[in-house]
Image (cartoon, helix red, strand yellow):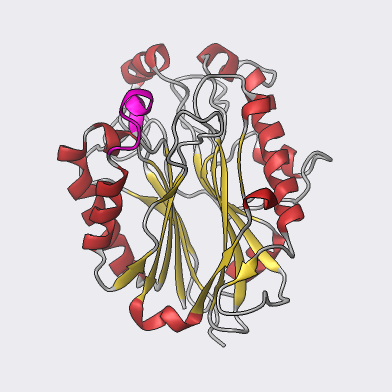
Amino acid sequence: MRVLLLTHNVAGIFDDPDEALRPWADGLAALVQRTRADFIALHMQEVGGSRWRTCGLNGAAAVAGAVEAALPDHWSSGMMVRTDTAEDGFTALGSIYLVRRSAMQLVRLWRWKEAEGAAGAFESLRAADGPLGYLLTRWQLGGGGGAVLDLVNVHNFHDESNLAALAAGASTYASCRQQALSLVTAALLGLRGGGAAGGGAAPAPASAAFLFGDFNFRSRPRSLPAPLPTSDRELAPFSASAECALPLEELPLAFPPSYAYREGKGDGTPPDEAGWCDLLASKRCPAWCDRVLMDRTGGALVAASAVTAEYGHEPQPRVLTDHNQVYLAFSVESR
């Protein structure tokens, strides 16, 4: 059974749906066709766009409808999102899950009680204004004896200051990012063994965790302009720290920074020297913000994939948002 995990910060899609929504949905359909995905997990951040405070989630139904129309051979969960933007716990996270209709009997979704904590906001850690948090769903893929996957949509803190991001020491926001990830990994451990599987009692197999979203990790180039490094300075130290309840790993990064996609050559590659100056004057540092991370069980599952796992970004046909889409494609055994 082929799996596609995809993350995209979609603020630009919500801000300009007339121009961006159709090509974005068509691009998603092309990626699904190329990877031949049976199960698609689409994690979105900044649902509602930059005007969510005044407009709410007016465009959410249109986005979900465009995805469904672009993938008629797949059942869609619809948009999973907290709809009350006035609540303190609003995270602007939206998730859509799709299953090829011919594979529906091979998939189960868990049900959670609200008190179990499958969703949460980073309110107590807030270092900047804006909705941030996590949203977890659990699925079994491949039939009754198949793999159980915990899929976590995450939007973490960003650096407000470019100077702080480039400083030798970690910024306040980097510290908040680590605290937020600590909260998420602890919540994941606490949720294992909870929930109820659709169609019967929860099966015993240990779940594999995949966290994919906008982590806002920052790179630290030694000088600008210069090629950005192929790894960041935040994930590895955090994963090895005592604050990390669940060590995380990742396939090698072999694609350009996913942010700021609007700058440079339009394909995610860094801008020239003049472009760097403009970029640092107006935006946060380019980086691999959008990632697909996994625990060791998830890493073993990907390593056992019958098809070669593919970790990359999907270039936009034209610039639709300032983040590029990042995805992980692999397969799980059907039993």
- Residue 303 in sight from this viewpoint: no
| Closer to us: 260 or 72 | 72
Q: Nearer the viewer, residue 132 or 7?
A: 132
Please tell me which residue is depicted at 34% across the width and 14% down the height of the picture.
278
Residue 104 in the figure: left or right of residue 115: left
Residue 222 placement (x, y as % from top left) = 57, 22
Residue closest to the far bottom: 335
Q: Give the magenta range.
A: 49-58
- Magenta portion: prevailing SS class: helix
- Residue 163: x percent and y percent? 55, 12
Q: Quadrant of the C terminus?
A: bottom right
- Percent across and percent down for residue 13 are 28, 39
Q: Is residue 75 above or below residue 314?
A: below
| Residue 154 sits above or below residue 79 on the image | above
Residue at 49%, 24% (x, y): give it: 130
Residue 153 lies within the magenta run: no
Quick check: 286 above or below 199? above
As for residue 50 lying within the magenta part, the answer is yes
| Left or right: 126 as drawn, with respect to 49 | right
Q: Is residue 298 left or right of residue 315?
A: right
Give me the residue at 51% from left, 34% from top: 90
